[in-house]
Image: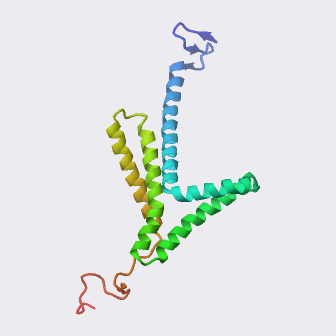
Amino acid sequence: MGYSLDGAVVVVEGATHATLVAGAITMIVIGILLNIVGLGIFCWLLFSLAINALPFFVGTTAGIYSLQAGAGPFGAVVVGLLTGTFTLAAGQYAFAVARVPIVRLAIVLLFAVPAACAGYEATFSLVHFGIPSERWREAFAAFGAITVGGTAWARVSIMAEPARIGGITPDPTQPPIGVTAKDR
């Protein structure tokens, strides 16, 4: 094996001619692509955590308390996961069962306000890296808070049946729109 003056590796037996530039460029491209994928996964996890801020907080608190009570690390994780899952399910069930709009609003706000606060802080922290203007950072953080809070609102209320307005319920035997009695 010999070396040429430009730093390329040349196989004397005539098999291949490989340069260090081709390998470096390939690795840079792969590195950039993996960084984009990793950043996307990180942002998705951060968004999911911010949406579920209340169940995460309740689960973390229960897990830490059970760890201090002697449940051990595995038991603390199990207790935290079960408690957080129960909190989310109980909130969705309470929203679905409640028929009074004020109670439904209180339940949704119980989940959406912590999510909006977490979304604001997460967005503000992320845009702090790339945006020097304080006003633009606040604008992006407010947009993040609205987005995360609205998504949390939708996730809590997605499992609920539509509320009956004035005792009126939709009749499943009604004809499709545009069909008259003569067409039946």
Q: Position of residue 2 (x, y in %)?
A: 61, 10
Q: Position of residue 97 (x, y in %)?
A: 49, 77
- Residue 9 visible in the current orientation: yes
Pick the front one: 7 or 118? 118
Name the residue rendered at 54%, 64% in the picture: 88
Name the residue rendered at 36%, 88% in the picture: 173
Pick the front one: 126 or 57? 57
Name the residue rendered at 39%, 78% in the picture: 163
What is the residue that sits farthest to the top in this orientation? 5
The reply, left or right, for residue 2 in relation to residue 113 is: right
- Residue 157 visible in the current orientation: no
Name the residue rendered at 58%, 14% in the picture: 10
Coloring basis for residues: rainbow
The reply, left or right, for residue 92 in relation to residue 127 is: right
Location of residue 93 with respect to 155 vertically, above or below: below
Q: Position of residue 166 (x, y in %)?
A: 34, 84
Q: Position of residue 41 (x, y in %)?
A: 51, 45
Which quarter of the rendering shows the C terminus?
bottom left
Answer with the quarter of the image where residue 1 lies. Answer: top right
Answer with the quarter of the image where residue 157 lies. Answer: bottom left
Pick the front one: 177 or 10? 177
Answer with the quarter of the image where residue 135 lies. Answer: top left
